[in-house]
Amino acid sequence: MSGMRTRTRLSVVITAASLSACALRGPLPPGAPPAGPLPSGTAQPGSPTPEQPPPAAPERPAAPAPRQFHLGPAASALVTQAHTQAGGGDYGQAAATLERALRIEPDNPLLWIELGRVQLSGNNAAQADAMGHKALALATTDAGAQSAAWRLIADSLRSRGRNPEAAEADGRAGSLAPR
């Protein structure tokens, strides 16, 4: 019985010593070869073998592709409804309808532009300007949406008599996409 205990204790001591040696070395950095030699005939990880060409340099990530924003079916239906409401002079209801659409697609700059147009029609140029800037922030990869946002900003500035700034905003809109 004591021989069995001695072997058990010995295996526990050996296991503990192995684990502590690993802990002292610490984790290897990603891509680092393992410590110690590999069995003969085995190549180090990452080193080229006669059958394997050297690893290629990592590719740079591509720039994000330009994104063109579109309205989904539900948002599109709400925009149509808002146009009808605004056409009838009910700008408050049209804005509420567009806010419903924004709950569906909050990051769609086209909806912010629509809401800004309704605000501008309802004589709320400061809100229209804010909506234009929000749309501009969201439309970083869509030149058409950026242009429309700048045109909204220009119209809101013009309605407040800030014509030089409106002309500058119109220029920015024109440089992004022609009318």
Image (cartoon, helix red, strand yellow):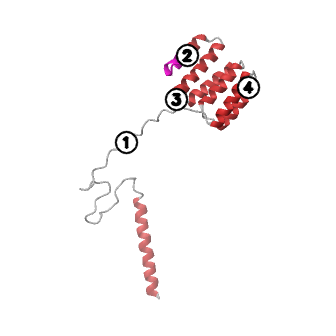
Q: Which residues are magenta?
A: 169-179
**Among the two numbered marks 3 and 1 on one chain, the one whose residue lies closer to the N terminus:** 1
Q: Quadrant of the C terminus?
A: top right
Residue closest to the far left: 50
Q: Which residue is mark 1?
A: 59
**Type of the residue with mark 4:** Gln
Q: Which residue is mark 2?
A: 170
**Among the two numbered marks 4 and 1 on one chain, the one whose residue lies closer to the N terminus:** 1
Q: How many marks?
A: 4
- Please state which of the two labelled residues, at mark 2 or mark 1, is closer to the viewer: 2
- Residue sitting at x 62%, y 26%: 113
**Magenta-colored segment: predominant secondary structure:** helix
Secondary structure state at the residue bearing disc 3: loop
Estimate the spatial distance between the alpha carbons at disc 2 and disc 1, rounded to whole Å.
39 Å
- Please state which of the two labelled residues, at mark 3 or mark 1, is closer to the viewer: 3
> What is the crowding at mark 4: few (fewer than 14 residues within 10 Å), some, or many (at least 20)?
some
Estimate the spatial distance between the alpha carbons at disc 4 and disc 1, rounded to whole Å.
52 Å
- Residue sitting at x 37%, y 53%: 31
- Give the quarter of the image for residue 131: top right
